[in-house]
Image (cartoon, helix red, strand yellow):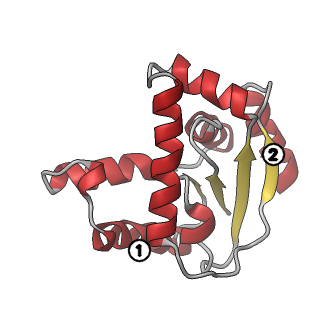
Amino acid sequence: MVIAICGRSSVGKSAVATILGAHLGVPVRHCGESVKEYARQCNRSASELANADHQTIDDATRRIAATTDRLIIEGTFLDSVLTEVPGVILVRLLCSETERQQRFAGRGSGGDDAFRARDADDDMLRSRLYVESRSSPTPIDIDTSGLTADEVAHRIIEACNP
């Protein structure tokens, strides 16, 4: 069983994936951390990575998802990255804009301007890297507004019946 958790920034992907992995006793792949590590190895910042670099990271994520029996993967663009990997359960986390902004600010990531810039950067990266339209598996949508990460993890467990 591979569960892929996707969604915009500050919807709770990382926290939920960590808790879900602990509850199920399975490893977790944090795609954002994979991007940062790859950039460090190339002596660049994540924003300086070329499309080919992102493709390399995405290929590794697809390979891991296709060859691992039990895994939680979390990342913003997994709905595009894992479209052709069979057997992946895709969970899309949603959250109200207001709560996302509060979570973003609570992490010390900046105010409203930084939040909007992050969303704009994500939108630009999505359109740059994932322009072709592929049929994505229908995700399980879970609204995280007003919920703790533990509550969301339990909803995922209920929805997936692992």
Residue at the front extreme, as displayed: 113
Three-letter code for the amino acid on which mark 1 is drawn: Asp
Front residue of 86 and 68: 86
Percent x, y for residue 96?
76, 34
Q: Is residue 38 visible?
A: yes
Percent x, y for residue 101?
61, 27
What is the number of the mark on residue 59?
A: 1
Residue 109 left/right relative to 98: left
Bin the neighbour count of mark 2 within 10 Å (Cα to Cα): few under 14, some 14-19, many 20 and up: some
Q: Residue at x 24, y 55 (%)?
A: 48
Q: Secondary structure at mark 1?
A: helix
Bin the neighbour count of mark 1 within 10 Å (Cα to Cα): few under 14, some 14-19, many 20 and up: some
Three-letter code for the amino acid on which mark 2 is drawn: Ile
Q: Residue at x 58, y 69 (%)?
A: 80
Residue 152 left/right relative to 130: right
Q: Residue at x 68, y 63 (%)?
A: 1
Q: Secondary structure at mark 2?
A: strand
Percent x, y for residue 123?
53, 56
